[in-house]
Image (tube, grey):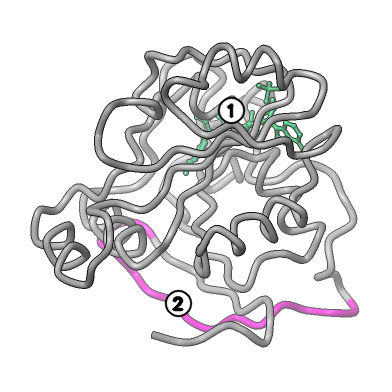
Amino acid sequence: MSIDGYLGSAMPQRLALSNDADFDRVDAVRAACDAILVGAATVRKDNPRLLVRTLARRDERVARGLAPSPIKVTVTGRAQLDACANFFAADDTEKLVYCASAALPTARDRFGPVATVVDGGQPVDMQRMCEDLFARGVGRLMVEGGGMVHTQFLTADLADELHLVVAPFFVGDSRARRFVGDGRFPWHPDRRATLAEVRQIDDVVLLRYALSARFRMD
Ligand SMILES: NC(=O)c1ccc[n+]([C@@H]2O[C@H](COP(=O)([O-])OP(=O)(O)OC[C@H]3O[C@@H](n4cnc5c(N)ncnc54)[C@H](OP(=O)(O)O)[C@@H]3O)[C@@H](O)[C@H]2O)c1
């Protein structure tokens, strides 16, 4: 996020906040996960590929008997996603779309040929989704945004660990998305989160918070 807590700009284009060294760190975290989740708005706006970028990391996963990149996961209420988006590319990764019950027929029609569409409830219930992912073999899920998804994971106390990276500039436009929206978070003045690590990565800073007993320093 920016110094003032924004995840991007209010413009239609993606705004890169991290630097190369931090993008490489994110790549290593991706490679260590079983699945990566982004919200449908992030699929629409950023069109991310959500793949492990480094060949050595992909090879290392394959040597461990895994797919080169983790499973891609998204969540949607309206199923208004482009089936040609990078998320759905034919890239040897499994794709899961957790869709609100009301839009299931549309979602199956649109994404059935390129992804597995799962009924997530009305709206999609993040805890139920996590339990379904676990049943599909996902032990470690990386949530890469955006703000609406962050808010639900954090307010529902579903995250074990938070990686907050602060880029050295301001966005200064309240039409942009903040890191989280309004909500009742389990961490507040009377219950402070545990700061586990602070790391400078060139011109950005990584703050790692331990949010549950399952947090492991690695
Ligand atoms: N800086 C970063 O690291 C980073 C990372 C990711 C994203 N971003 C930025 O974040 C912004 C997007 O964030 P955002 O908060 O607008 O959106 P988001 O969290 O990416 O996605 C929100 C969408 O996900 C679906 N959704 C979320 N919760 C749902 C639920 N419980 N049930 C059903 N559907 C649900 C809905 O999709 P439908 O609208 O399809 O119904 C909703 O509109 C973009 O500007 C992007 O560039 C930044």
Q: Is residue 52 magenta?
A: no
Q: Residue 174 got which mark?
A: none
Q: Residue 198 got which mark?
A: 2
Answer yes or no: disc 1 within 8 Å of ligand 1.
Answer: yes
Left or right placement of residue 16 versus residue 52 in this view? right
Residue 171, position in %: x, y?
53, 32
Name the residue at 52% across, 34% down: 116
Residue 45, position in %: x, y?
49, 20
Name the residue at 52% across, 39% down: 96
Q: Residues within 10 Å of mark 2 (few under 14, many from 20)?
A: some
Which comes before the other along the chain, label 1 or label 2? Answer: 1
Left or right placement of residue 194 versus residue 138 in this view? right
Choose top left, top right, bottom left or bottom right for residue 64: bottom left
Main SS, magenta region, reads strand
Q: Is residue 194 magenta?
A: yes
Q: CA distance from mark 1 to mark 2?
A: 30 Å
At label 2, the amino acid type is Val
Instruction: State the SS at label 1.
Output: helix
Q: Residue 40 got which mark?
A: 1
* Nearer to us in this view, 7 or 129: 129
Residue 30, position in %: x, y?
35, 58
Name the residue at 60% across, 56% down: 133
Give the image quadrant in which the ligand numbered 1 is located. top right
Query: Is 175 situated above or below 49?
Result: above
Magenta span: 190-204
* Nearer to us in this view, 171 or 45: 45
Q: Where, quadrant-wise, is the C terminus in this rendering? A: bottom left
Query: Is 203 situated above or below 6?
Result: below
* Nearer to us in this view, 121 or 207: 121
Mark 1 and 2 residues: CB-CB less than 8 Å, in contact? no
Instruction: State the SS at label 2.
Output: strand
